[in-house]
Amino acid sequence: MTVQNSIPIVVGVTGHRNIRSGDRDALYRAVLSELSALKARCPHSEIVMLNSLAEGADTLCAEAANALSVPLIAALPMEPAEYEKDFSGEALKTFRALCAGAEKCFVVPAAETPPDSFNRDFAYRQAGIYVAAHAHVLLALWDGKETPASNCGTAEAVKFALDGAYEPADGVPLGGFGAVLHVQTPREGSDSADAGTVRFLGDRAAFDGVLARTDEFNRLAVETAVDSPALLPTDREPDALLDQTETLYAKADALSVRFAKQYRRILAALAIVSTVITIAFLLYDEAELHWMILVCGLALLAAWAIQHYGKRLACHRRYLEYRTLAEGLRVQAFLRYAGSKTSVADILSWSERTETGWIAAALQVVPVGAAPNRAHDIREPWVNDQRLYHQKAGKKSERSRSGSERIVKTALCLSILLYLAVLVFECIWGDLLPFSGRIANAERCRTLAKLLLGSISAATLFISNYYGRLSLSRVASDHHRMERFYAAVLDRIDRYGQTEDLLKHLAREELIENGNWCSYQRDNAADFNL
């Protein structure tokens, strides 16, 4: 694709071949309208069409895409020389022209277990599965009728998108996350008069959320400057799809780091302002410094402004989502570099699919294209690099956790010492015991003690709350666990080699680890409500 620093909004296409000639104008206008509406809704995203270029509805949609300068990706069911047997005359010329003008043209891989010999219907079915599974929305030029005699038609493609209704060679499709724009398309010979009407199939709210979050990311990604991606060796052979994945990873990683810093600054600011509010009120109440009520009011106003800014920025949500996206893209890049055809989206957990649907959709569309044609050793760039990363990060988290514990313990010790000092004061000069003496400034001393004790207690509370939100002990434990995991993987590769099963296991463990991290970070998020 021409744009490599944003996630494309992919429109898949399925439809009847035998559409009525008199309906072409109405159908063409409907397709133009839907594509234009998507472009308007997602101004920061590139709209891309994924199309198998069959005669009839596919060709009509491809022509509409060309009219709107929507890039075309040709996902063919079989090799072009074999596929061309389905065309003749002008249709064959059109097919060749569309293939030549497409940004990508490739034969889709089989999702299901292939038959012993070449089967045309099986190839068409795999193309339908691929297009439905790798699109944000499926544009279906369909009459809405079931076709029980076929297993590779438009009705089946709609089921693929909405229900994952197929039997993959590896794994189980959970389905239920697709969206379909059904353009009513009567077949040749039908007397229906409603050609071109459009209805939405699927979860509209979920689809709207996917588009909004994807376009939000693309807007921020364009504004974010990053260094050249350095995930993989720079002297590898050219691979445009791998370059795009690395670039998107760098964008997502930079955005995650940016919003993580903002979130921590907001946490620190709230802790400081909350401490100021407590101390100012103590001075107003105990020391009778009446002007402190103004400081208290200003601090409350500052706290309101901080929490309003935190909500508007949504930094915690963006921090976690962009970290999840970055990790998924990183794993996808390593899988492709290793020569694996596995899509990260296919091994996401149910929780990740439902909680961050737009990320699952992004991970489906980013790898669209020809399968990798070469396998590389991933021990150094992936496994050992991650082992060293978790080793260093674990030590850093331990130091941060130890530092936070020392601060809290120091504050607690000061509170205890102050309490003992007050107790001694009351015993000797405060009338606490029958033989206690008296001093003239006893009340002033008590007020000072209250101020000190209250201030230290407030500071201890807010400091421990700040560090608690960072989940340092859990983070350190996870880093040590993952360090041991990567060491075990290195040993397994040395013993048995780099197998597809091991690559999938490695990818799945990374995704699970990141999912667990996001889960407890989400549960431990700061509440910005006053």
Image: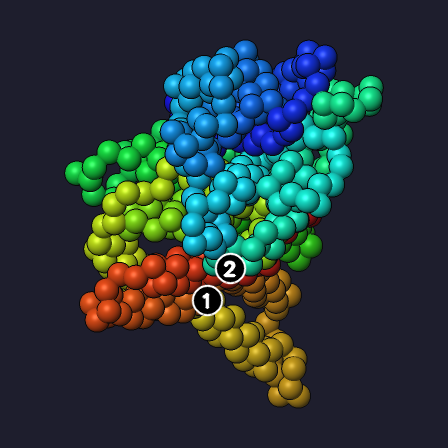
Image coords of residue 23 (percent x, y):
72, 15
Tell me which numbered mark, 2 or 1, is placed earlier along the sequence.
2
Q: Which type of secondary structure does the marked residue at label 1 adopt?
A: helix
Residue 468 drawn above or below residue 13 = below
Q: Is residue 299 visible?
A: no
- The image shows residue 138 at horizontal and vertical percentages of 62, 33
Identify residue for label 1: 474
Residue 103, can we see it?
A: yes
Q: Position of residue 458 (x, y in %)?
A: 57, 60
Q: Residue beneath label 2, please?
A: 171
- Mark 2 to mark 1: distance in Å? 31 Å
The extreme left residue here reads: 235
Specify how the rendered protein is coloured: rainbow
Identify which residue is drawn at 41% across, 66% down: 478
Q: Nearer the viewer, residue 158 or 453?
A: 158
- Judge from the rendering whether residue 410 lies leftward or rightward of residue 360; answer left or right: left
Task: Kindly identify the amino acid type of the residue bearing the numbered disc 2.
Answer: Gly
Placement of the N terminus among the 4 image quadrants: top left
Say if 489 sits above or below 232 in the image: below
Mark 2 neighbour class, 10 Å CA radius: few under 14, some 14 to 19, many 20 or more: few
Q: What's the residue at 29%, 67% (across, down)?
A: 489
Q: Amino acid at mark 1?
A: Arg
Q: Which residue occupies the foreground of this view, 350 or 526?
A: 350
